[in-house]
Every structure is written in structure tokens, then in C-alpha cells.
Image: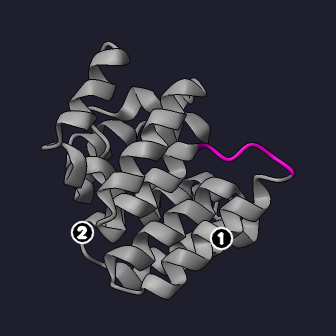
């Protein structure tokens, strides 16, 4: 399940979202309770603008795993749809969770980027770099950060990360 889900990453990060959807759906056909496939499917559907489907997949993933990254993904998709209140609620939930467990600032950065709050998004990416978040490896390819790519501060983080 994990390998089959990861096989969808080149599609997703290569901007072939329809290919990613096909791959993630193949995983779900054989493992319908595998949260990671629903999580990744939600991301791909959001990039295709299929927000209702994306939110449904992410809600199912959250029900199956209650993972903090799913909360961030939900917040990002809500921000993409203009539902600022739901996006801010996700941010608040992540801050609350951070009292008991690690929450990567990278996850928060993706929500802030979708909200158009580029200053806060950059600040969170700086923190993610300082925390050595493994998500930093996706800086060059993560569609969630496309709104930041034109910023010199984003390039500075990429340079520090040697990407």
C-alpha cells in the first residue's frame, strides 16, 4: 500500500494530477481503509479544482488516521475554496495539537500560502528549515507553495536548503 501510494508522487509533483488520481484510486480499490492514499488523493483532487471530492477524501483520511498533516491539508483546501474560517480553524487545531506533539511549520506554511498570507507562510517555512522538517525536500516541487515561488525570501530558503 505504501509503495503503491508513493508511486503516485511523481505524477503529483510532476503536475500530472489526473495520473496521480488514477494511481491513488488504484490503491484505494485494494485498500479502502488506507488513510495515506485518501490523503494523497485529496491533494490531487484539490489541484484539479475538484474541491468537494478533495474535502471528502481528506475528511475520510482524517477519520481513519486523525493525522496532523491531514488537518493541514483540510485547512489548505478550505483556504483554496475561500473558506477562511475553516482554514483558520485548522490552523488553530494544529497549534493546539502542537502542545502535545510535533506539528511541522511546513504544514502551517501551506495553509498560509493558500490564504495569501505570504509573510506568515515564509516565516513558517523558515521555522520548518530550522526544525529540519523532512517536508523541506519538497520545496522545489510542492504545488502548495507555488504562490511563494516568486518571492526572494522563498529563494533564500531554497538556497539555504541547497535545493
Secondary element under disc 1, as helix, strand or loop, is helix
Residue 136 visible in the displayed image: yes
Mark 1 or mark 2: which is in front? 1
- Looking at the image, what colour scheme do you see? one colour
Q: Where is residue 37 in the image (x, y as percent from the top left)?
A: 54, 55
- The secondary structure that most of the magenta stretch takes on is loop
Q: How many numbered marks, from 0 up?
A: 2
Label of residue 153 in the image: none
Outermost residue on the top side: it is: 162
Q: Is 139 situated above or below 59?
A: above
Q: Which mark is residue 48?
A: 2
The numbered mark, 1 or 2, whose residue comes first in the sequence reads: 2
Judge left or right: residue 15 versus residue 80: left
Quarter of image, res 126: top left
Q: Which of 88 and 123 is in front in this view?
A: 123
Disc 1/disc 2 C-alpha distance (Å): 27 Å
Q: Position of residue 42 (x, y in %)?
A: 45, 66
Q: Tell me which residue sits at (50%, 44%) in the image.
A: 106
Q: Is residue 103 magenta?
A: yes
Instruction: In the rendered view, tell whether residue 77 sits above or below residue 19.
Output: below
Badge 2 marks a residue whose secondary structure is loop
Can you tell which quarter of the image residue 71 is in?
A: bottom right
Q: In which quarter of the image is the C terminus?
A: top left
Q: Say which quadrant the N terminus sits in.
A: top right
The relative height of residue 10 versus residue 112 in the rendered view (above or below) is: above
Which residue is denoted by mark 1 in the rendering?
Answer: 92
- Give the magenta part as a residue range: 100-104
Residue 41 image point, x, y percent: 44, 61
Looking at the image, which is closer to me, 158 or 19?
158
Q: Which residue corresponds to the image point at 34% horizontal and 59% vertical from the top-left?
A: 113
Amino acid at each position: 500500500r505504501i509503495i503503491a501510494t508513493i508511486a503516485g508522487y511523481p505524477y503529483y509533483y510532476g503536475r500530472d494530477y489526473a495520473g496521480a488520481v488514477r494511481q491513488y484510486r488504484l490503491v484505494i480499490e485494494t485498500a479502502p481503509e488506507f488513510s495515506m492514499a485518501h490523503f494523497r488523493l485529496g491533494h490531487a483532487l484539490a489541484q484539479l479544482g475538484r474541491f468537494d471530492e478533495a474535502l471528502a477524501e481528506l475528511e475520510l483520511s482524517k477519520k481513519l488516521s486523525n493525522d496532523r498533516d491531514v488537518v493541514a491539508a483540510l485547512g489548505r483546501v478550505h483556504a483554496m475554496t475561500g473558506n477562511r474560517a475553516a482554514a483558520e480553524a485548522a490552523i488553530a487545531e494544529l497549534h493546539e495539537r502542537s502542545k502535545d506533539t510535533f506539528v511541522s511549520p511546513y504544514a502551517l506554511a501551506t495553509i498560509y500560502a493558500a490564504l495569501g498570507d505570504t509573510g506568515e507562510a515564509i516565516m513558517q517555512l523558515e521555522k520548518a528549515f530550522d526544525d529540519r522538517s523532512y517536508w523541506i525536500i519538497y520545496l522545489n516541487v510542492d504545488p502548495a507553495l507555488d504562490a511563494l515561488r516568486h518571492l526572494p525570501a522563498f529563494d533564500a530558503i531554497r538556497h539555504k536548503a541547497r535545493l
